[in-house]
């Protein structure tokens, strides 16, 4: 009986330490040291309304905005995940063909990078490659009646260079900067 009591006591102590004390301590420290990241890297507009997260992609379909990477989950964070369709799956090939045709119809004439037609493994990637942003410049510039060089400069300003992934752009941040640039020109 004493072995059972010792085991139950040890279980209770470890449960309290690893199940309650440690997670609460890490949560409090993270919230204190990294408040923005701990609360989801939320982005707010000028009226202090939450309009998104820097960590989760959004669907932009209007021609005056840069298009995001496609999402297998419909940009729904509660059902994050890839489609699990293999490279020869007819459904995937049809989706890629449909997305490619939509981009051509929108006015993109350059070869289309894969991240504009294929979903990421999470389905929520907020970034596109710098190349994907740059090939959209003529379409967005035309829709906004802006000079392409000015828009290209904005894209390059918003891009981030990483030694691991190359240059990339957060689409929500780029589109917000684009809206702010338009507001300042009015």
Image (cartoon, rainbow, N blue to C red):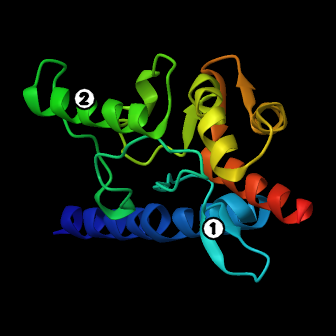
Q: Quadrant of residue 1?
A: bottom left
Q: Callout 2: helix, strand or loop?
A: helix
Query: Which comes sooner in the sequence, label 1 or label 2?
Result: 1
* Nearer to me, 71 or 36: 71
Residue beneath the point at 41% across and 62% down: 14
The residue to which callout 2 is attached is 97
Q: Badge 2 local density, few (<14 within 10 Å), some, or many (20+)?
A: few
Q: Nearer the viewer, residue 135 or 72?
A: 135
Please tell me how many numbered marks the rendered image carries: 2
* Residue depicted at 29% across the width and 52% down the height: 73
Measure the C-alpha gap from mark 1 to mark 2.
38 Å
| Residue 161 in the image: above or below residue 50 | above
**Left or right: residue 1 compared with residue 55:** left
Any part of residue 151 in sight: yes
Which residue is drawn at the image coordinates 54% and 46% (left, top)?
126
Q: Quadrant of the C terminus?
A: bottom right
Above-or-below relation of 166 to 28: above
Q: Secondary structure at mark 1?
A: loop
Q: Are marks 1 and 2 in contact (CB under 8 Å)?
A: no
Please provide percent x and percent y for residue 19. Answer: 42, 66
- Left or right of 95, for residue 25: right
Q: Nearer the viewer, mark 1 or mark 2?
A: 2
> Would you name the residue on which mark 1 appears?
39
Image location of residue 129, percent across then percent down: 58, 27
Q: Nearer the viewer, residue 183 or 57?
A: 183
Towards the viewer: 24 or 171: 171
Q: Is residue 138 above or below residue 111?
A: below
Vertical comparison of 76 with 20: above or below: above
Residue 53 x, y percent position in the rendering: 59, 61
């Amino acid at each position: 009986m004493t072995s059972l009591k010792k085991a139950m006591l040890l279980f209770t102590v470890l449960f309290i330490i690893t199940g309650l004390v440690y997670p609460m301590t890490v949560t409090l420290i993270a919230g204190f040291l990294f408040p923005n990241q701990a609360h989801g890297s939320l982005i707010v507009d000028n009226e202090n309304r939450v309009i998104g997260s820097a960590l989760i992609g959004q669907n932009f379909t209007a021609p005056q905005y840069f298009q995001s990477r496609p999402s297998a989950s419909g940009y729904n964070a509660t059902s994050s995940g890839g489609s699990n369709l293999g490279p020869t799956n007819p459904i995937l090939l049809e989706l890629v063909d449909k997305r490619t045709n939509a981009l051509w119809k929108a006015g993109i004439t350059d070869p289309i990078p894969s991240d504009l037609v294929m979903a990421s493994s999470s389905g929520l990637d907020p970034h596109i490659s710098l190349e994907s942003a740059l090939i959209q410049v003529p379409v967005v510039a035309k829709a906004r009646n802006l000079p392409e060089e000015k828009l290209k400069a904005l894209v390059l300003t918003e891009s981030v260079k990483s030694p691991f992934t190359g240059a990339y752009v957060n689409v929500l941040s780029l589109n917000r900067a684009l809206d702010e640039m338009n507001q300042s020109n009015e």
